[in-house]
Amino acid sequence: MGKADRRGRVGRGDKNLLRLLVLLALVFALMAVLRPGQFATAASLNSMMRQFPEYGIMAIGISLAMITGGIDLGVVGTANLSAIVAAKYMLAAVPKGASPAELAPYLFAAVALAVATGLACGTFAGTLIARFNIPAILATLGTQQLYTGIAIGITNGRPQSRLPLLYSKIGNTELFGFFPLSFVLYALIAVGIGLMLSRSRFGTCMYMLGTNPKAARFAGINNASVIMRTYVLSGLLSSVAGLIMMARANSAKADYGAPYTMQCVLIAVLGGVDPNGGFGNIAGVTMAILILQFLSSGLNMFNSVSNFYRDVIWGGVLILVLVFNRILSQRAERRAAARRTAQGR
Amino acid sequence: MIQLHRLARRSEPYVLAAIVALCLLIQARSGQFFSGNNLVDDVRSLIVPALFSIGCMMVLVSGGIDVSFPAIASLAMYMTDRILLASHYSGSVVLAYAMAAGFGLAMGAFNGLLIAFLKLPTFVVTLGTSSLYTGIMYGALSASASDVPPAIAAHGKAKLFTATNEQLGLTSNMPVQVLILAGLIVVVFCLLRYTMLGRGIYAIGGDEAAAERTGFNVRAIKMFLYCFVGFTAGITGIVRISMMSFADPSTMLGMELTVIAAVVLGGTRVTGGLGTLTGTILGVTLMIIMANSLILIGIPTYWSRVFTGAVIIVGTGVTAHQVGSTRRRARAAAALGGLGGGVGAGHGEG
């Protein structure tokens, strides 16, 4: 919370990645040993690669917002609304019994509509935060309700199913017979956003804004524009997640994936993104996603473990990680202070 | 211009005007608003959100946010319910309240430890503990809707008076639980207005560092706040199941949004330092009347979530706009009066 303790945390990045890597290997090894011939198989890895991209992409969106010192709780609502707009369009526009060649332009238009919806949702959230100075938590709590509400309103709460089969067929293609398209999309997005954060001017601006908005402004950064672009980007990512969800379930539903919000915040914090802003990278977030997916898929293989224990585990892990990071940063801060006094003498 | 700003600074008049306008609109469209049973029904559905909103407002005033109170209330009431059922308890309902308040207090204290002593961000912590508490309820206790002990059922049937609608032949009972709400309002009113603790809550919301230097024990105040939220949440849980006369673990989950929206609508500033009990109760009243009357004024129920979202956005937008103008004033006051300006602005209208 204090801004002063940031100093001690600089340079923690690599250590954090190393810790996550060790944790990832431990979880994988543990599950592989406890569930031999079941967990570490090609089939189970393939099914995990199908599961995580949809929430992984939203977790990247939330992480971006958290790096700038905000949060985007509207990602799930945006994803569902985008999917529903696309689904409604396809249901209304596609003629019955169209051949794949005839279908193609409709599918393109549906994807474009979903992406446009995501951009619009992000722009709206960004406007509330950047122009009207509404705290990000409340603005996005509001947009989450609003988008979910609009999605319920335009569908009367009914799932939109019986979409053209070609759409989910494309969505579930596997590259080289193993890598699902959604996984490839995730990989491309992760690399792209990772490079944007570390190499581009915009990425640097995001970190500076998250570390100290006042200093960022005095450094000549247009804070409002950086916030705006961050939430638009998060909306764009959410719409991609929505398209993936729609392909996986072959339907779109207004209240799909409600627990994803909590899970995405957990991923961001576990992955080393500072909830107060200024720190975090996509490599850490990706490792956190994999840790959670290994845990969740592994736990699924134990029949005695109720699905509801997952809530306990997610909540517990989130708090443990927060406490652990806090203690580490306090120790680093104390060491830095000791070093300063030693030099002073 | 300055006078306009001064008028615009307080939200209570607006909320009150909105309530009156809405009541008249509903009365004009349905002719049923001012009937005795409709008013009693509105008070009835007001009790639980209003009980939640008071603790929620105090946390927001201190500059924090708590989204775990529905989870605390659910787990506390569910544990109490199961224990009392298992032991075939047949005594007074007071024990049920005491137990639920105790469980709630313990869960609130856990939040408080993480927030006050480890200085972790309040939103992420309470989001995590919320998931933890609901997970314990559904996972470890495999909760599902269950009966309530006779004491709670009898307590739920008790009524202060009955209002009858002659025209439609409908009757509504005013539940005794409304007295708990009245009691809590009196206690919190005195606490915020007449005690050092109450001043401290406003002070740390205005400027934590300044409050600490003025001599407030910031840790103790924060610890108290989250314990208090847990304590009132536990009591609210019992109020809820006694009024429903069965214990449904999911009945309160998700209420955090509407409650926070109502509190913010009532003029409480999410960045801390400002918020009044009057405004909070008015905000909750407005939300409840609107939610209960959406159909009466011709809005289909499918759109009710759009409506909650819009209320949060508009409500926070207005307060955020007010922060901008007050901050300028505070800066001017600080320039004139040194430290006193900052603390004074923090106190606001208790």
Image: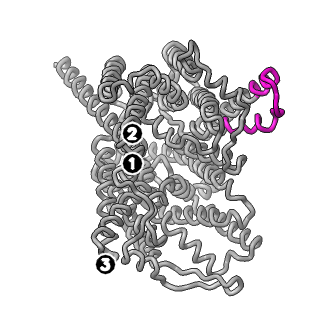
Residue at 66%, 69% (x, y): give it: B20
> Relative to A298, does residue B267 appear above or below in the rendering?
below
Front residue of this view, candidates B176 and A129: B176
Tell me, yes or no, whether the two marked residues, 2 and 3, touch with CB atoms within 8 Å. Answer: no
Q: What mark, if any, has residue B90 been given in the picture?
A: 3
Q: Is the magenta region chiefly helix, strand or loop?
A: helix
Chain letter for the residue marked with disc 2 in the picture = A
Could one spot residue B236 in this view of the protein?
A: no
Q: Can you identify the residue that label 1 sits on?
A: B135
Point out residue A28 in the picture as x, y percentages from the top left corner: 35, 24
- Which stretch is magenta? A83-109
Give, as a three-letter code, the residue at label 3.
Ser
Q: Quadrant of residue A345?
A: top left
Give the alpha-carbon distance from disc 1 to disc 2, as whole Å: 9 Å
Would you say residue A106 sits in the magenta stretch? yes
Residue type highlighted by circle 1: Gly
- Asked if labels 2 and 1 touch by Cβ distance under 8 angstroms, the answer is yes
Residue A318 visible: yes
Q: Would residue A115 appear left or right of A285 to someone viewing this image?
A: right
Q: Is residue B283 left or right of residue B135?
A: right
Q: CA distance from mark 1 to mark 3?
A: 30 Å
Residue behind mark 2 = A314
Q: With A154 as the anchor, is B183 left or right in this view? A: left
Residue type at the position of mark 2: Trp
Q: Position of residue A255 (x, y in %)?
A: 59, 45
Whether labels 2 and 3 belong to a single chain: the reply is no
The CA span between labels 2 and 3 is 38 Å
Give the colouring mode of the picture: one colour
